[in-house]
Amino acid sequence: MKLFLIESGILGIVGGLIGITIGVIISKIIGQIIVNMVDIAFVIEINYIVMISILLFSCIVGSLSGFLPARQAAKLKPVEALRK
């Protein structure tokens, strides 16, 4: 059961990192478009506390979503759990 929970937590963190990366890239692209169109100074501020909070939240959500399958697999015999 611990293995399933750790794996789902790690997958949540990886998903959070991918989401943060895509969000930063899109915000920089939109910032450049706005600067080129309107000639307004556009500052993108990256808040690291928010990023850490996002990673923690994605780890918690991943762990919670892995809890039910982990609990069901822990009740089965190992061969049956692998078969499902």
Image (cartoon, rainbow, N blue to C red):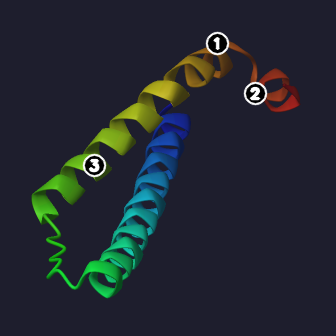
Q: Which mark is residue 84?
A: none
Residue on which disc 1 sits:
75
Q: Which mark is residue 54?
A: 3
Spatial CA distance of label 3 from label 1 is: 32 Å
User: Eyeballing the image, is 19 above or below 36?
Assistant: above
> In the image, residue 38 lies at what x, y percent?
27, 79
> In the image, residue 2 lies at what x, y percent?
47, 35
Q: Quadrant of the C terminus?
A: top right
> In the image, residue 20 lies at what x, y percent?
37, 62
Q: Residue at x 62, y 22 (%)?
A: 69
What's under tag 3, amino acid-wise?
Answer: Ile
Label 2 Cα neighbours within 10 Å, binned few <14 / some 14-19 / many ≥20: few
Spatial CA distance of label 2 from label 3 is: 34 Å
SS category of the residue bearing label 3? helix
In front here: 6 or 75? 6
Spatial CA distance of label 2 from label 1 is: 9 Å
SS category of the residue bearing label 1? helix
Q: Residue at x 42, y 69 (%)?
A: 26
Q: Is residue 22 found left or right of 34 in the rendered image?
A: right
